[in-house]
Image (cartoon, helix red, strand yellow):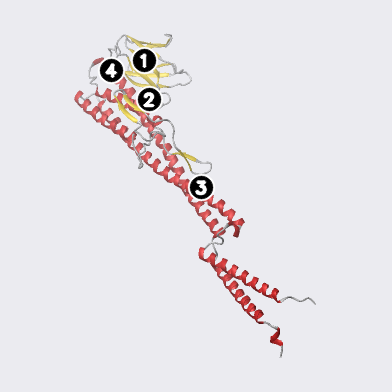
């Protein structure tokens, strides 16, 4: 018959007590911390999952911070360019007022001064700084003002780069627009032309309309229109005649896909140069318009030349307004993308927190039940040990 030594009973009893005390201690730690485990060794699989989720939470938090920065920077650019557009509209209004034949030289000078003030305001807006003192139109060179007024015009000292901020693993958005693209390299509108009157013109003919009416015929070349009495002739850069005819004030002169209209009477020998519009600076275009408004140009051929130049300058101003409007549209699109991303990131953050909670947060109801169970088991083990410890053969000898 197998006999079990008394020491074995002692060892089993002590082991049971130790095990229950350890289980009870673990539950107490869980209830104190609110977590199912505090070290990876307690639940390696869940701990690994928590590490992955925590990294995802860190990424989402970073993207949310970027979204806030983008919202602030794009909002500032939006309001700044809106103010630029307002100033351009005011300049246009003043220029149209100055172009009225009833306005005298003194009034034109006053209007030119008001336009100059609006241009100064635009330069200040182009040098706008954010809350951190960074210049928003300097590209990635944000420490100094990107635009400087010099005797020869406004100079750009920023760069063409932009800061890109990620809003996800595969998504990033430009935090702004470089000032050279916004203000210094404004592409002409499709089909626009530069038409200028020769300084020696003596007639009263002035340009009222110029456009490319057939892009398949226009080769982007330069042409010269010359009047001889009531006749006109157009030659290309190689001095080849491409069109000729009789001029009638108000009627269009058409050649090589181009249409020009003039009012007034040209003098024999009057010439006009025609060519494609080129990339322009907003500042120089506006300054050119201001100079024309300030030019008296009140009599004879001087008035005609001024009117032709005014037509081109006003067309250029319209191009500048379109440019700012287009940039604003791009800013608005990015603002909407940031708004959408912000909502998606908030949802993702909530989902990750819920996942983390499921992995590591303690269920207090279950923990309380386990605590009571382990406590009861421990008490029973302790009572059993006391009984075993009291056993002795002498208890049975009468």
Does 353 sit above or below residue 111? below
Horizontal relation, residue 298 to residue 329: left or right: left
**Rendered-image quadrant of the N terminus:** bottom right
> Which numbered circle lies on residue 59?
3
The residue singled out by tag 2 in the image is: 280
Q: Residue 185 sits in which quadrant?
A: top left
Element type at mark 3: helix
* Extreme-bottom residue of the structure: 398
Does 361 sit above or below residue 383? above
Residue at image point 57% right, 58% down: 39
Residue at image point 39% right, 41% down: 73
| Alpha carbons under labels 1 and 4: distance apart | 15 Å
Element type at mark 2: loop
Other-residue count near label 3 (Cα within 10 Å), few / some / many at <14 / 14–19 / ≥20: some
The residue singled out by tag 4 in the image is: 304
Q: Which sits earlier in the primary sequence, circle 3 or circle 1? A: 3
| Alpha carbons under labels 2 and 3: distance apart | 43 Å
Element type at mark 4: helix
Q: Which sits earlier in the primary sequence, circle 1 or circle 4? A: 1
Do the numbered discs 2 and 4 sit on residues whose CB atoms are within 8 Å? no
**Rendered-image quadrant of the C terminus:** bottom right
Residue 163 percent location from the top left of the image: 44, 37
Residue 280 percent location from the top left of the image: 38, 25
| Alpha carbons under labels 3 and 1: distance apart | 60 Å
Horizontal relation, residue 256 to residue 227: left or right: right
Residue 341 percent location from the top left of the image: 48, 46
The residue singled out by tag 1 in the image is: 273
């Amino acid at each position: 018959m197998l006999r079990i030594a008394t020491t074995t009973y002692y060892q089993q009893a002590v082991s049971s007590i130790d095990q229950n005390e350890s289980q009870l201690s673990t539950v107490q730690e869980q209830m104190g911390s609110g977590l199912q485990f505090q070290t990876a060794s307690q639940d390696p699989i869940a701990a690994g999952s928590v590490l992955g989720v925590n990294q995802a939470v860190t990424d989402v938090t970073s993207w949310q911070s970027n979204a806030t920065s983008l919202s602030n920077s794009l909002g500032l650019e939006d309001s700044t360019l809106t103010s630029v557009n307002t100033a351009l509209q005011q300049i246009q209004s003043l220029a149209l007022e100055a172009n009225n034949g009833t306005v005298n030289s003194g009034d034109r000078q006053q209007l030119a001064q008001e336009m100059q003030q609006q241009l100064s305001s635009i330069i200040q807006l182009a040098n706008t700084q954010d809350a951190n003192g960074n210049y928003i139109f300097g590209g990635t060179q944000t420490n100094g003002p990107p635009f400087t007024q010099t005797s020869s015009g406004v100079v750009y000292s920023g760069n063409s780069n932009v800061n890109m901020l990620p809003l996800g693993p595969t998504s990033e958005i430009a935090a702004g627009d470089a000032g050279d693209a916004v203000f210094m390299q404004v592409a002409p509108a499709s089909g626009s032309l530069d038409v200028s009157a020769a300084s020696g013109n003596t007639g009263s003919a002035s340009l009222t309309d110029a456009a490319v009416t057939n892009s398949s015929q226009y080769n982007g070349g330069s042409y010269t229109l010359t009047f001889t009495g009531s006749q006109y002739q157009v030659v290309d850069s190689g001095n080849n005649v491409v069109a000729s005819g009789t001029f009638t004030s108000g009627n269009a002169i058409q050649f090589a896909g181009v249409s020009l209209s003039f009012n007034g009477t040209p003098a024999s020998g009057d010439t006009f140069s025609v060519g494609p519009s080129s990339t322009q600076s907003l500042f120089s275009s506006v300054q050119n318009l201001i100079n024309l408004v300030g030019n008296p140009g009140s009599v004879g051929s001087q008035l005609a030349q001024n009117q032709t130049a005014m037509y081109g300058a006003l067309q250029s101003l319209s191009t500048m307004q379109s440019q700012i409007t287009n940039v604003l549209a791009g800013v608005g699109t990015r603002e909407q993308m940031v708004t959408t991303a912000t909502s998606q990131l908030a949802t993702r953050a909530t989902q990750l927190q819920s996942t983390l909670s499921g992995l590591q947060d303690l269920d207090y109801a279950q923990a309380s039940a386990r605590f009571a169970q382990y406590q009861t088991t421990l008490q029973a083990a302790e009572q059993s040990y006391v009984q075993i410890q009291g056993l002795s053969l002498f208890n049975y000898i009468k």
